[in-house]
Structure formats: C-alpha cells, structure tokens
Amino acid sequence: MGGSLLLTGCKLPGFGEYSGATTQGRTEEHLWQLFFIAGLVVGVFVFLLIIWAIFKYRRRSDQMPKQTQYHTLLEITYTVVPIIIVVVLFVFTVLAENKVDATPPDPGAKITVSAFQWGWQFAYPGGVKVIGQTTQDPTMVIPTGTNVQITLESLDVLHGFYVPEFNFSRYANPGYPTTFDFNALHTGDFRGQCTQLCGLYHSLMFFNVKAVTKSQYAAWLHKEQAAVKSNPSSVPALPSGVSSARANTNAASNSAGGNDNGD
C-alpha cells in the first residue's frame, strides 16, 4: 500500500515534469530526470544506512559501543563522494543551460513579446500585432521545426513569462529586454501565464501559444501582413497609459529586417 501511494505521487518517467514540447524543454526534462534519479540513489543509500545502524547498533547494554572517529579512509570517502556528485551535477547543469540559452544566428521566425499590466503584446515582422489583457488571452502563433527567436520585455513592472509545457520561464524586466529561442517539436496549443505578482489583475494575465507547421505559419503571417498593409488602422493598440515607445521601436526593427515567414 505504501508503495502504491509513493508511485502515484510521481509521474514516470518525467517525475512530475512535462516531457517538453520544444527541444529546449526536452533538454530541461533530461536534466531534471538526472537530478531526480541522483537524489533517489542518494536518498535510498542514506535510508539503508540509517536502517542498518538502527538494527546493528541498537542499545543492548550500558556499555559504550566502539567509536569510529578519526577513521581516515572513511572520512575521506564521505567527504570526496559528495563533492564528486555535486561537480558532476554542476557540469551537466552548465551544459544544459548553454544548450537552452544558445541563440542560432538565423532564426526561422522573430517575435517581440511585451508584457504590461495586465496583458501581453506579440509583435511580428510587417507590423503585425496581437494584444490581449485580463480576460482577453492573446495567442502567440509560432512555427514548428525551426528556431523561433523571442525578444522579451516589460513595459512597466516586473513580469514572468512562463509556458509550463515548454518547461521554460523567464523574467520580463523593465528596461532590460532578453532574447531566447524556442524550437517546437510538434503542433498544438499551450497555456502560458505571468509568474510574478505584478498587481491587481496578475491572476488574469494568461496567454496562449499555438504551434503550427511552417507552411501554416507562413500563410497566417502573410495574411496578417496583408491586412495591416491594406488597413493600418486595424492594428490593435496598447491600453492607454502603457508606454509603447520600446514596443514600436522593436516592431520597426523587425520590419526593417524583412518579412520573416518562417520558410
């Protein structure tokens, strides 16, 4: 019964982690699995040592049992082994972080994500914008099978960009835009949210990520760019009071880089 309760508490083989819908998310999943397995091994070993000590050295009389302090080999062993474990985990962590944070020089798509109280703006090349706030959850469309470069910024206070199924979270710091990449492995719809308490309606600050094929993304972006060109006034605007200077600068920069259709 105890084993059943223990096993139902963890989803194997991810140990409670999402499998990762992006290549970066898969890397983070594998790192989590490594840490979890290492923790299980150490935990089981310590538990067995405790059980062994309880039964072998349980009190049988008032006589002082034999002491093992100053046992040089034993002390070296329980000092060196934990250090080796920490070094190995540190090396794998650095390798995983470098892989996740790598930004290829020629991404298949570029999107500027602007967080504000309390919503999101997704700006694409050609002046295309998607904006939503509070109960209006905006959708960020991305192509699969290619690197999507995200430039994340905040237009007011500190926000958090989090997509659980991507195993990814990043701060949106005001005045300090950051850049990272996604490479979606398959199509699908994914839920995202703000993870930093940013004010009254923080709990409503959700968004969606829709991963489509490269051809579907190209067709969608071309259609939206054509709509912007034929009717510039149709482009949604940020709520009043939200500074759009940085967002407009980034959008203009994306437009100058050409029409990125994800092909």
Image (cartoon, rainbow, N blue to C red):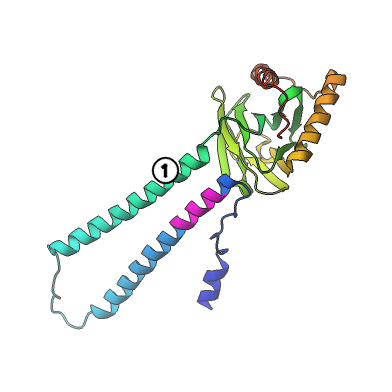
Label 1: which residue? 94
The residue range painted magenta reads: 26-35
Q: Nearer the viewer, residue 50 or 83?
A: 83
Could you tell me residue 23's position as x and y percent?
Answer: 58, 46
User: For the stretch drawn in magenta, what is the main secondary structure?
Assistant: helix
Quadrant for the N terminus, please: bottom right
Residue name at image x 34 percent, y 73 percent: 48
Could you tell me residue 126's position as x and y percent?
Answer: 75, 23
The quadrant where residue 136 appears: top right
Is residue 120 visible in the rendered image? The answer is: yes
User: Position of 64 compared to 99: left or right?
Assistant: left
Q: Nearer the viewer, residue 98 or 153?
A: 98
Q: Nearer the viewer, residue 57 or 109?
A: 109
Residue name at image x 44 percent, y 55 percent: 35
The quadrant where residue 5 appears: bottom right
Q: Which residue lies furthest to the bottom in this view?
A: 60
Quadrant for the C terminus, please: top right
- Disc 1 secondary structure class: helix
Residue name at image x 72 percent, y 48 percent: 187
Give the number of callouts. Answer: 1
Is residue 58 visible in the rendered image? The answer is: no
The quadrant where residue 53 appears: bottom left
Residue 108 covered by magenta stretch: no
- The amino acid type found where label 1 is placed reads Val
Say few, some or many: other residues with alpha carbon within 10 Å of mark 1 (under 14 / 14 to 19 / 20 or more). Answer: few
Could you tell me residue 247's position as x and y percent?
Answer: 67, 21
70 in relation to 219, above or below: below
